[in-house]
Image (spheres, rainbow, N blue to C red):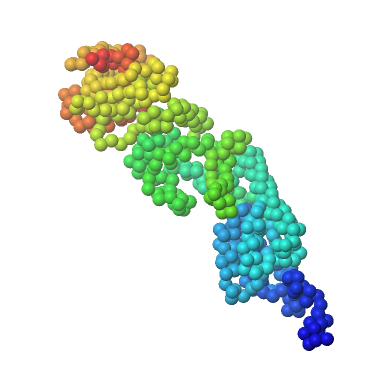
């Protein structure tokens, strides 16, 4: 036997399987030696939806991990624990999980494997199939209690079981959400319970007594209920009253800002830290007008959370939480009043019907909706005070040939609608003619319980004073103080002084204080005029003006 044959025979005799494995190319994984599996990094997660104390959750998860690896000689060298992160959030978007993934690149990280306390808390859906190859690429092991050992990517049973765990995690989360939502719906429906969150403007959250659950009551939990915050509640009542009186969202917001009424974020900065407290906006008024909780009933589920892909072209990036209005069928209302009302159900319903009537006109442009009292550089005497009898909208001011006109255009109505078919192409009224007619009509009201007829100088129009006293019939004596109020109004609008010489802003303020309103019918060329005397709100005077146009 040659020397070469002797050497080869000696190698095979020492470890024939090792020689054969080397020739075939089989990689043999040695069992852990007496030193154990070594140093590991622990990862866990706790979110608000779990309704657990983060310290308690971290304690039992890390305890499970230690019980799993210590018999195998493993110890935890580093801990990564995410708090307030939903399991649906991918690992790269979780702060602690992202740090763990970044540590994989560090050869001096101090650990060679990762262990978790519970797999369903760490992975959701298909997350494991995206993370496991990344961890394995750096030669780091992954120990999972549900597998009873280290994850083996070459074992199809392991891959299948982890896919099942991901599905179970997703199903568990959805079932928990459904149970919590059903319980909260029942609490609102049967008890009218306040479910937390910021109190609507006009209310404050106060103590409502011990919690009805005996266990929670012994732990010190208290119910929270809504009570009226009178200063802000008065602003809410004003918003609804002005809206029902014909003002738009922007006009109401401008009026509140003009009167220095604190907006919600200014009134309660502690619960509106994300707001700038920079005054009232039309959107703020809109949200108040659309909030049914002002009726005294509890409502829940008007807005829902939903998850949308962060990047539709990259599903692995995961989902983000968004909010949207819920379907009306999912909104829950208490069977009985749950807190003091600020607005009656009737007034709230009227406001919603009015908003729907505006929105049903079809076109989103503001000119196609109710014209509001927007601020303008120029002062107009009848700004927001003249309505078209055909479409019921306010006629807005326009300047042509140095004259002020109030107009209502057919083209701003929904095409082919019944009101557009009955509406003239354009309706114009000269401001000076309306001013003279109104001033002359007011001058005939010195005795409001007698009808009078007068001729407008220069206008060629007749003005019939037809009184309509809310507290007395036309043949009875007007309430005390009526004559004095009428005399004061006539003096302020004397044709020789106010109407011809006073500033438009002054005359407009007088009209506003008297709540002067006109409804012009272009088919008859006549207008119905009404006013309420200042400091005599119970007295409503009305009349008819004719011949206002050439």
* Residue 377 appearing in the image: yes
For the point 22% across and 26% down, the residue is 400
Which residue is pictured at 75% across the width and 78% down the height?
33
For the N terminus, the quadrant is bottom right
Question: Quick check: 272 above or below 348?
Answer: below
Above or below for 79 versus 409: below
Residue 359 image offset from top left, x and y in percent: 45, 29
Closer to us: 34 or 388? 34
Which residue appears at 43% of the width and 41% of the height? 284
**Residue placed most toward the observer, 73 or 386:** 73
Q: Position of residue 423 (x, y in %)?
A: 37, 18
As drawn, which residue projects farthest toward the bottom? Answer: 3
Q: Position of residue 255 (x, y in %)?
A: 35, 38
Q: Residue at x 56, y 58 (%)?
A: 93
Q: Which picture quadrant has residue 488? A: top left
Q: Based on the displayed image, in which of its 4 quarters is residue 161 positioned?
A: bottom right
Say above or below: 491 vs 211.
above
Left or right of 527, for residue 186:
right
Image position, residue 506 (x, y; %): 23, 32
In this picture, residue 268 sits left or right of residue 522: right
Quadrant in which the C terminus is drawn: top left
Between 413 and 197, the one lying in front of the other is 413
Between residue 222 and residue 421, name the one nearer to us: 421
């Amino acid at each position: 036997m040659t020397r070469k044959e002797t050497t080869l025979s000696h190698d095979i005799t020492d470890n024939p399987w090792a020689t054969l494995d080397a020739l075939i190319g089989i990689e043999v994984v040695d069992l852990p030696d007496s030193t154990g599996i070594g140093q590991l990094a622990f990862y866990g997660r706790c979110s608000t939806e779990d309704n657990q104390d983060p310290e308690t959750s971290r304690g039992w998860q890390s305890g499970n991990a230690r019980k799993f690896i210590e018999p195998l000689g493993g110890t935890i060298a580093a801990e990564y624990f995410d708090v307030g992160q939903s399991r649906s959030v991918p690992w790269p978007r979780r702060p602690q999980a992202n740090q763990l993934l970044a540590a994989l690149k560090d050869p001096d990280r101090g650990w060679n494997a990762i262990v978790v306390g519970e797999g369903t808390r760490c992975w959701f859906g298909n997350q494991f199939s995206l993370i496991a190859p990344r961890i394995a690429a750096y030669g780091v092991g992954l120990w999972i209690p549900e597998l009873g050992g280290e994850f083996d990517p070459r074992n199809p049973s392991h891959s299948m079981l982890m896919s099942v765990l991901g599905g179970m995690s997703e199903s568990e989360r959805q079932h928990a959400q459904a149970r919590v939502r059903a319980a909260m719906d029942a609490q609102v429906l049967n008890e009218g319970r306040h479910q937390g969150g910021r109190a609507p403007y006009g209310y404050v959250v106060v103590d409502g007594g011990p919690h009805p659950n005996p266990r929670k009551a012994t732990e010190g939990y208290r119910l929270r209920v809504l009570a009226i915050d009178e200063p802000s509640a008065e602003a809410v009542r004003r918003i609804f009253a002005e809206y029902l009186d014909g003002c738009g969202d922007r006009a109401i917001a401008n009026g509140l800002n003009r009167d220095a009424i604190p907006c919600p974020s200014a009134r309660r900065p502690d619960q509106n830290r994300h707001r700038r407290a920079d005054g009232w906006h039309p959107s703020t008024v809109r949200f108040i007008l659309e909030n049914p909780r002002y009726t005294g009933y509890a409502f829940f589920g008007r807005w829902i959370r939903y998850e949308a892909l962060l990047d539709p072209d990259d599903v692995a990036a995961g989902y983000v939480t968004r909010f949207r209005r819920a379907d009306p069928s999912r909104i829950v209302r208490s069977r009985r009043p749950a807190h003091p009302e600020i607005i009656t159900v009737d007034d709230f319903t009227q406001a919603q019907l009015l908003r729907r009537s505006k929105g049903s006109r079809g076109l989103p442009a503001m000119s196609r909706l109710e014209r509001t009292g927007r601020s303008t550089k120029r002062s107009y005497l009848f700004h927001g005070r003249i309505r078209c009898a055909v479409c019921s909208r306010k006629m807005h001011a326009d300047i042509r040939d140095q004259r002020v006109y109030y107009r209502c255009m057919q083209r701003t109505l929904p095409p082919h609608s019944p009101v557009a078919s009955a509406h003239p192409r354009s309706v114009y009224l000269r401001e000076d003619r309306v001013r003279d007619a109104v001033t002359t009509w007011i001058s005939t009201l010195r005795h409001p319980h007698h009808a009078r007829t007068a001729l407008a100088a220069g206008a060629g129009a007749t003005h019939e004073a037809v009184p309509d006293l809310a507290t007395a019939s036309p043949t009875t004596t007007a309430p005390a103080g009526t004559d004095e109020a009428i005399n004061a109004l006539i003096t302020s609008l004397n044709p020789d002084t106010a109407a011809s010489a006073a500033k438009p802003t002054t005359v407009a303020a007088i009209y506003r204080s008297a709540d002067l309103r006109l409804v012009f019918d272009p088919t008859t060329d006549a207008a119905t005029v009404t006013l309420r005397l200042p400091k005599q709100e119970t007295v409503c005077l009305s009349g008819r003006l004719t011949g206002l146009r050439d």
